Image (spheres, rainbow, N blue to C red):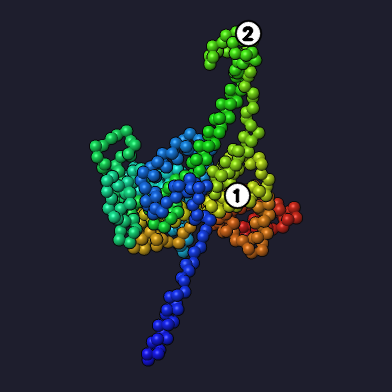
Amino acid sequence: MVAATDRKSVQLSRLRAVPLRRVRSRFDSAATSNDNRRHWANADALSADAAASPEVRRTLRMRCRYEIANNSYARGIVLTLANDVIGTGPRLQMLTENGDANREVEREFDRWAREISLAEKLRTMRQARAQDGEAFAILVNNPVLSGPVKLDLRMVEADQVASPWRGWLDEGEVDGIILDAFGNPAAYRVMKDHPGAIRWRARDEYFTVSASHMIHIFREDRPGQHRGLPEIMPALPLFAQLRRFTLAVISAAEAAADFAGILYTDAPANGEADQVEPMDLVELERNMLLTMPGGWKMSQVEPTQPATTYAEFKREILNEIARCLNMPFNVAAGNSSGYNYASGRLDHQTYFKSIRVDQAFMAGRVLDRVLAAWLWEYALTVGAVDYVPAQGLERILPNHQWFWDGHEHVDPAKEATAAEKLLKAGLLTEAEYQARRGVDWEEHQAQREREAEGRAKRGLPQPWEAGAAAGVGRGSDDPSQ
């Protein structure tokens, strides 16, 4: 037993004698040197909510609004994004087994959406996400509406959703958002007046809105983030550089176009040249003969602006600006002169995919909640019990889908040929094809049947009959097939 203990102690002593080596790995990106110290000076380890503090978001909102209000490119990019995502507005299609009730609900919802200008409010919310980082809308009762449903959306700017206490915050509150024990938004504090309004109150007055009545949308870039940052935030310095460069080029071109210059002489100091007051300014008139003092010459500014790289610089910086929004250059600039057909189609594929993702986000976070509240009130007033969301929960809705505006093809003939081949091969259905165009396929079929009946009553040839006479044969345009 003793011998075994001695052997164990010897082995331990040998292990202690071996020098311990720490395994270290080194990454160039984690190294700080004199060359990159200034570049990474603002990098921090703050949490998502701490990084997006109220002061930081307020500064970003002010700068984004200023840039969009004064920069034509920024304004056009934000408007184009909202128009492409929302378009003329979403259209509802109910998919329950009761077809007559489906069409009735669709008509009533469309009538209500037009009355409250739902599409316009959705476009405003999309613009607010781009320039403010987030958008708020409160589900309220509007007795002025003429329809049976008095539901309406009251838009609230991000500045009004804030905590009324500036000195301290509760642990379960993040700048106006009250969280429950599980970290879910339970209520929102909304100031009665905008902080920048003309009307001023001695103290902050606010009202509390339940989370079930508040729609809050933003892009969550980090886990645990509760408030949004402007989507054009990375492009703000680029917008400033674009405007500065444009103004500098214009100023240089104007100076060169004017009759401006400097007086100089080759005579030595105190020489034969006439005395001229140094740094003196002389106002000149256009189309006038000018005489110089004795011994002096005039040198006009060379018209070297705009430089040959001016257009290239604007193209590259606009391309970089639009990248943070997944927008191609020709859409951001409104200019496709440098594109061919293939490159334009390729760039638009990425852009259209981003739009589809954005539309799905708006449908899930905004439209479904609006539809749940609308169906609940519609069922109470009209008596359509089958359309009441289960237990009043917005997540349990009757089967439905949303249609958005389709995107026009650059070459409609090629698109029609490809769609015809896919339909004949069974790789594409009528519903899928019409959904791409933003059309309800059932309404499309019903409209075709009505047109066919009207043509038959008037003795007019049907479109497919004209094709058969030309040797094309009866195609998919025949509603009888």
Quarter of the image with the N terminus is: bottom left
Q: Amino acid at mark 1?
A: His
| Dot label at residue 272 | 2
Q: Nearer the viewer, residue 273 or 113?
A: 273
Q: Is residue 33 left or right of residue 227?
A: right
Q: Nearer the viewer, mark 1 or mark 2?
A: 2
Q: Amino acid at mark 2?
A: Glu
Q: Is residue 106 above or below residue 166?
A: below
Q: Is residue 11 visible in the rendered structure shown here?
A: yes
| SS of the residue under disc 1 | helix
| Dot label at residue 348 | 1
What count of labels does the image hold? 2
Q: Is residue 17 above or below residue 375?
A: below
Quarter of the image with the C terminus is: bottom right
From the top left corner, tell me how far across and down residue 113 is, in percent.
43, 47
Identify the residue at the far left of this view: 202
From the top left corner, tell me how far across and down residue 140 is, in percent.
33, 48
Identify the residue at the far right of this view: 471
From the top left corner, tell me how far across and down residue 292 is, in percent.
62, 10
